[in-house]
Image: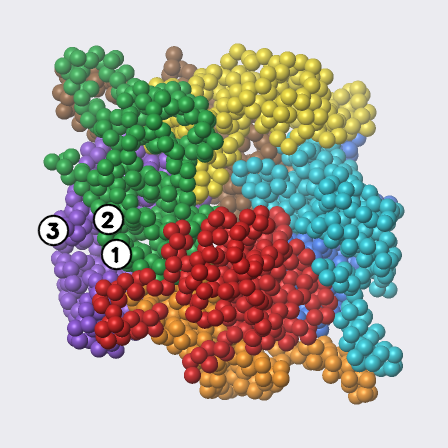
Chain colours: A cyan, B brown, C yellow, D purple, E green, F red, G orange, H blue
Amino acid sequence: MNENIRTILEGVREGTYSVEEAVLKLKEAPFADIDYAKIDLHRKLRQGVAEVIYGAGKTSEQINGIISAMLRSGQENILVTRLSKETFNELKVKADIVYHEEAMIATVGKEPVPDGIGKIVIATAGTSDIRVAEEAAVTAAFLGNEVVKIYDVGVAGLHRLMARLDDIMSATVIIAIAGMEGALASVIGGLCECPVIAVPTSVGYGASFEGMTALLAMLNSCASSVSVVNIDNGFGAAYVANMINHVSDKRKDIH
Amino acid sequence: MNENIRTILEGVREGTYSVEEAVLKLKEAPFADIDYAKIDLHRKLRQGVAEVIYGAGKTSEQINGIISAMLRSGQENILVTRLSKETFNELKVKADIVYHEEAMIATVGKEPVPDGIGKIVIATAGTSDIRVAEEAAVTAAFLGNEVVKIYDVGVAGLHRLMARLDDIMSATVIIAIAGMEGALASVIGGLCECPVIAVPTSVGYGASFEGMTALLAMLNSCASSVSVVNIDNGFGAAYVANMINHVSDKRKDIH
Amino acid sequence: MNENIRTILEGVREGTYSVEEAVLKLKEAPFADIDYAKIDLHRKLRQGVAEVIYGAGKTSEQINGIISAMLRSGQENILVTRLSKETFNELKVKADIVYHEEAMIATVGKEPVPDGIGKIVIATAGTSDIRVAEEAAVTAAFLGNEVVKIYDVGVAGLHRLMARLDDIMSATVIIAIAGMEGALASVIGGLCECPVIAVPTSVGYGASFEGMTALLAMLNSCASSVSVVNIDNGFGAAYVANMINHVSDKRKDIH
Amino acid sequence: MNENIRTILEGVREGTYSVEEAVLKLKEAPFADIDYAKIDLHRKLRQGVAEVIYGAGKTSEQINGIISAMLRSGQENILVTRLSKETFNELKVKADIVYHEEAMIATVGKEPVPDGIGKIVIATAGTSDIRVAEEAAVTAAFLGNEVVKIYDVGVAGLHRLMARLDDIMSATVIIAIAGMEGALASVIGGLCECPVIAVPTSVGYGASFEGMTALLAMLNSCASSVSVVNIDNGFGAAYVANMINHVSDKRKDIH
Amino acid sequence: MNENIRTILEGVREGTYSVEEAVLKLKEAPFADIDYAKIDLHRKLRQGVAEVIYGAGKTSEQINGIISAMLRSGQENILVTRLSKETFNELKVKADIVYHEEAMIATVGKEPVPDGIGKIVIATAGTSDIRVAEEAAVTAAFLGNEVVKIYDVGVAGLHRLMARLDDIMSATVIIAIAGMEGALASVIGGLCECPVIAVPTSVGYGASFEGMTALLAMLNSCASSVSVVNIDNGFGAAYVANMINHVSDKRKDIH
Amino acid sequence: MNENIRTILEGVREGTYSVEEAVLKLKEAPFADIDYAKIDLHRKLRQGVAEVIYGAGKTSEQINGIISAMLRSGQENILVTRLSKETFNELKVKADIVYHEEAMIATVGKEPVPDGIGKIVIATAGTSDIRVAEEAAVTAAFLGNEVVKIYDVGVAGLHRLMARLDDIMSATVIIAIAGMEGALASVIGGLCECPVIAVPTSVGYGASFEGMTALLAMLNSCASSVSVVNIDNGFGAAYVANMINHVSDKRKDIH
Amino acid sequence: MNENIRTILEGVREGTYSVEEAVLKLKEAPFADIDYAKIDLHRKLRQGVAEVIYGAGKTSEQINGIISAMLRSGQENILVTRLSKETFNELKVKADIVYHEEAMIATVGKEPVPDGIGKIVIATAGTSDIRVAEEAAVTAAFLGNEVVKIYDVGVAGLHRLMARLDDIMSATVIIAIAGMEGALASVIGGLCECPVIAVPTSVGYGASFEGMTALLAMLNSCASSVSVVNIDNGFGAAYVANMINHVSDKRKDIH
Amino acid sequence: MNENIRTILEGVREGTYSVEEAVLKLKEAPFADIDYAKIDLHRKLRQGVAEVIYGAGKTSEQINGIISAMLRSGQENILVTRLSKETFNELKVKADIVYHEEAMIATVGKEPVPDGIGKIVIATAGTSDIRVAEEAAVTAAFLGNEVVKIYDVGVAGLHRLMARLDDIMSATVIIAIAGMEGALASVIGGLCECPVIAVPTSVGYGASFEGMTALLAMLNSCASSVSVVNIDNGFGAAYVANMINHVSDKRKDIH
């Protein structure tokens, strides 16, 4: 945004913009206002980066409207998360759109060739955590990352996890997904030497309190490499992991 | 208690007791009432079993009084838990009494020769959990158990725990003590084939909520062999473990 | 697992295994990977011991797949818990399978002859706790235990419990199941001299908070013999109780 | 208060009061305003009923001031609760004042002859609950009730409670005081046939959460005769119990 | 129960009972065991007192069975609470049975003539609290009390409550029912001079937490005459109120 | 009410009212009692002010009854909140009634010409918060306020909010509506110089705890101009905002 | 801030500022950076408005530094809240500074002549709430408001509150301060016709949870005119109340 | 660890190790057991990487012992966190040791030259958050990172944060530290394009619940780039940030 201020100010100095135009520009530039939503158009400048719509609690009309506005403004890659199959079937999008059922994600545009530093490993404690893991996996792939999945490797059977030590040891960043007591994050955090994004899930019953127990446990991890996102937030974990896996891109930007 | 009812009833039938005496007996028999406490004298019958006083929140006068009443009634082995050094120093007990500082326990009488089925293993995740572990260890030993201690083997460094696999595999019962995320109980539960008594500790900070997080995590353990006692309750864990380690004694009692 | 490491290492020394083969073996041996689940095959070695599938949140396809893999690997006794009648009716298992409706458990294979030290007593406070009790009862019986049921003996009518004192006094281990204020565990713990596994249930309303109140109450039991499992976890209680009732088997193993 | 309105209105009709005087009267009559407190003088009309000052969080100056105002307005019996010994020693009251140390209560005036329907039984689960019990006992006695104390009769040793069944069965109202799992209220509620006022105490540690667990357990009591007051609120329990023990006085008032 | 022990003991002394018979009697006497429930028959002795069945979570078969057993043992007045209309319609009771729809209660037998000390006033803060109030009202009437209903008198419109001051002032006991912030109990407690049983309700939204806020507020009432029962527990409140309204009956019992 | 007391008292003095009539008047005047509701008729005196019915948990019969009573007593403007479309369709009101679907509000009577000090700005963080915002907007307009809506301006895209700075800076009072982390209230509070009424919404998932997180965050706002209402309480926020926007009317009333 | 952007942009157009200077200005203008604090100098422009320092958790050195920077920049009226007497005594301020002990506030500069629309009424439920009330009172007065204090008028003695109905009815805004069950806010909200700012206090014990119960109760107030600030936040309540009491100033600003 | 297994296995094959030696090696290699602690010596292999001791809850003797064991094993850089000044003064370390008072950290060895991808920005909302920020800053610097500090830039004064937009925009990773409502993380997350590690602090009062509110708010951040660590965990945030800032080192390791 700072860049924008500078550009606009220079435009004012050089007479390209009047002051009123400049004030207007500062306000209107970065988004399209379609009444019920203000769409960020800011990212379209960088080709290939996917734009994200959080589908939960939006009607098919609203999602249609937002996708249309994005397509109009030149956005080619779009990710719609937390999208039920019913709502997906009601969408009328004038572009190729694919529904990833287990992940509950729809994607518009092509999945890019992975260009990150290394691999993102996605591990789950149990079979029931897979829905969240798939949300993370589809997101990470669509943002341009190589993904390795290691499912059902909970700590009550350590040998299952140990069998995948090569993957654990060679990851650039690991997403550890678990409900119940959430111990997987700590054990992985003790085995690997890369950042671990922990995702508590609402899997469990009784005193799991819909994921609260796993969340608290992960926040108290004795492994220092663990940071945590919200319960069932596979998307958010993938988003952070993608940033980490592309972090050295920054160096190029700066120099 | 059923036994007592039968004995007293037989006494009535045989004329040894009048009905009034029987009602009285039913009421007064099993404890000594010293006003601020009603002392269970019921266990004195079985020689060698220690009687326990919960020291927290009792004055030295009260503890003196209770120990005296116990000694008078023939109790030879007494355990006082949660006893501060200050209160211990104020005690005036007419018997040999030993203070176990880290465990905060005083013991009267000799530690018995271990006579359980096997060994009780006591494992802690960290150094700060040792106070609770010592409470468990002193209790277990004083109740007649062989104790093996494995301290500072938290899951963030699995190899520390793996190095003690022999002990883990050969235990009769394991007490797993951990604060923070409490993952130790699940990992041990996945490795051993005996009951695991999990003790959450108040070790940690922030979202550990004084042990609540470890408690919840342990209750949600994916290892089915885990049951849980109250936060910092090393004594209770040892008490249950002792029962398990002596469970086959029951067979003898019955036959 | 330690045993396995030793065996494999000896294989390497003796030239039976190459180093690469040994690393492979260490990783692959103990489970079958059927993509959505990693099945522990580790226990098939010991004949007669039931393997357990947690049915909640699994599709009938997944459960079919897991049972088939188990049967293929020689497992004869299988227990599927938290299985709805609907899912059970969709199962296509090539083996005798029985559905225990109130317990919501399906079993494959024959119930073994009880071979524990003594009896497991299962007590409930009310009629509504029976579902959880049946989960415990079917599990305990299928793992090879004699089970005694004492239902609807809550503390508001002590005489109902007193009438079963003989059973209480002669148990090897007791499972105390209660919702609401969960006081049953403490009262039984004060009457018996064996370990008590307390199971809080979600029975109650208002400030019972779906079992949280009973859970907390049981964790604070003034009876030292009580340890606690998760809310409604009848299976887990039976699993621990079975371990305790077979604990002296260990002695034989060791010697 | 209705009575007062009527009286004042009649005064207006009869010309005794002007309208302005009446409005004034309606506002000023029932209390004395000493700036930091508005003292209820309403009760002085009925001789012998004690007035209560909640001492916690008040300075000795404020308590002195309130007692003086009460004495001036003719109040003869005063109860100051939650009063530390330090603050008591700083009081300068021109009347006989007695400090009940364990109850942390100071009383001015003579304890009345009991005139209730029957007896108030005060029972505690443990020795540590006695402070709260004494608060209840001193209050109940000072309000004109016969009090029977049954201390240290927690449910882990039922025979201790059973020994006092006569007292339990013959009470008019029972105050059941317990920390930890608070089961005493349910067990007593199941044994007696009178109202039970349950007082949770902050006695316990870990998951007792300063009395929250006992509070929740008591609110979920399976005994229908139980109602509950705040944690450690011995005074409140005695206040309600006194009302119940004097409830038939109302009949006389009405007729 | 004490009485029973004495009677049985005397039977033994006089040779009426053998010891074995006495032990049996002590165990079997006070209830009928119909497998899924142990029915208290203890109260049938005192004619006219209603027996209560908690209907929630019981099948119509179970309720039929319990009612039949009660009728067989001579119980004439029966109250079934928390009974849905659907379950009521499935009942097949060989006796007159009436369904009170708003209260969700079925009653067998005739409502007795009120014989309490005075009147039970039932007040609600809002219209939505009426369901709970009706549960209390039907229960209280069926237990033999005169009931006065004051509905929708929440504190945000004090004049509505003031208009019923006569009823408030002349009650023997008041049941104050409120959701949301639950302030009604405190205001009534400040106006009346009899015990107030507060019933928090689950009426409200957001931070009312299904009645938890009202519950906590009522427990912290600044009016000392307030004690509290579980959320939505209209039955429990009426049960306690009935005990209080009949408390002087005890005097007659004793003398 | 004070005014009323004075008027009635003067009536008594002047002989217009007997004392009995006065007592009666004091009780009956300000509301109509239609059994299940006590309707405040107090406001009808001031023409044009809308009366409010909280529709949730009321049947269409009850709402019909209340509206009829209001119309009978001369109330012309009525607002029914939290009214489902189904219930609305069942209403039979003899007056023009309009349903505002997104706001879930029905209104009887004409929306008044705005007469407040300035404008009420209603801002939401996201699209999903709009339902709550519309409840606030319809309420505020119907109470006589000019409303400016700024939707979907959450803090993760600050430029969207900045683009509406003119509206923010010129508001008389702002209603800030947000779920999830609720940060919008603090950021707006830091930008504007008028009171901010924060409304947490139940929008979010996992650790948003149905709006609890947003609620707590708003209560801890580092901006001193923020006060908070209950979760999803758009009506309440508009009610307070309306009071503030008309606060200088008071000056006229007083002089 | 919008104003500033415009001014700076005009400066650029007119050549007064270079682009670099403009960027610099946009960044540096509105605060002074003294390393550990960034002091807002923005308000000094409007004479007479007090600047506020939150004293809790700041050393006397830091507070000295901030006051000095404020004085240097022309700020004449300064309020330091949550300031202990100890820290106050260590301050070395080169200006007249007054310490308000009960409010724990220090003020620099003269208290302004009240210039609000009307009066701010500050009411407390009890004597222990006075500390919070004084924080509100000193703040409100120092911000230029007439303050009326009504202390110790809790709902358990309604007549005390009724006696001050004139003040309640004539307030422009009311601050209702209460701990325990916090019912005062609802009762006042039902009596007055102006906005009520509710301040829960940490006064109470047991289930008051340090003010959480009062906070929740106030958020659920059945009176629509109530909004809530953080526990013990007397300052915040006064800050909002001051804004409301000066809200019509905005009209002048705009026109 | 996998590497180690391979190395040891090769040793066995080549006859360098006997099987017994290999088993021993597998167990003993990676740490030094000094009774109360098991020190990880695993990292000493990679020169220059600091080893960390968590000082809280350890005696000076224990810390002395651990440091000595580390120095003996060749570790040159050591970080002791959560170390009080008192405990630091009791340390007797035979090496240069420096105490960073505000950060409560002691360091042994030289701070390395920064070698990360870019800069770690550490931002705090307020002055009181600085202690946590300094813990992060000292840790990050000692692990080899360039650190930029931006303190006291909370969202209630957005211009303070905007003034540092250059730093925000050019960071490789940002640590956002805030108590109270924790909104800083979301606002920074919306402005930058790199991962944000959010650290809730225990700064605040009342409903901040010692940092719980900030924690929950940060977990619900509407900015997808935010992940969260435990309350006050400045060390953990810096540890994760360091991993991210060195993540491209992995690429070199792999190839």
> Foreground residue, A42 or E121?
E121
Q: Which of the chains bears the disc numbered 2?
A: E
What's the amino acid at mark 2? Thr
Give the Cα separation between the discs numbered 1 and 3.
Answer: 31 Å
What number is the disc on residue H181? none
What's the amino acid at mark 3? Val
Determine the secondary structure under disc 1: helix
Q: How many numbered marks have been drawn onto this rendered protein structure?
A: 3
Please identify the quarter of the rendering in which residue H151 is found: bottom right
Answer with mark 2 or mark 1, whichever residue precedes in sequence. Answer: 1
Q: Left or right: F79 with respect to H227? A: left
Determine the secondary structure under disc 2: loop
Which percent across, then down, holds residue A104? 73, 42
Dot 2 crowding, Cα within 10 Å, few <14, some 14–19, many 20+ = many
Give the Cα separation between the discs numbered 2 and 1.
Answer: 12 Å
Determine the secondary structure under disc 3: loop
- Badge 1 is on which residue? E166
Give the Cα separation between the discs numbered 2 and 3.
Answer: 23 Å
> Foreground residue, G175 or A128?
G175
- Badge 2 is on which residue? E172
- Badge 3 is on which residue? D113
Q: Residue at x 58, y 72 (%)?
A: F113
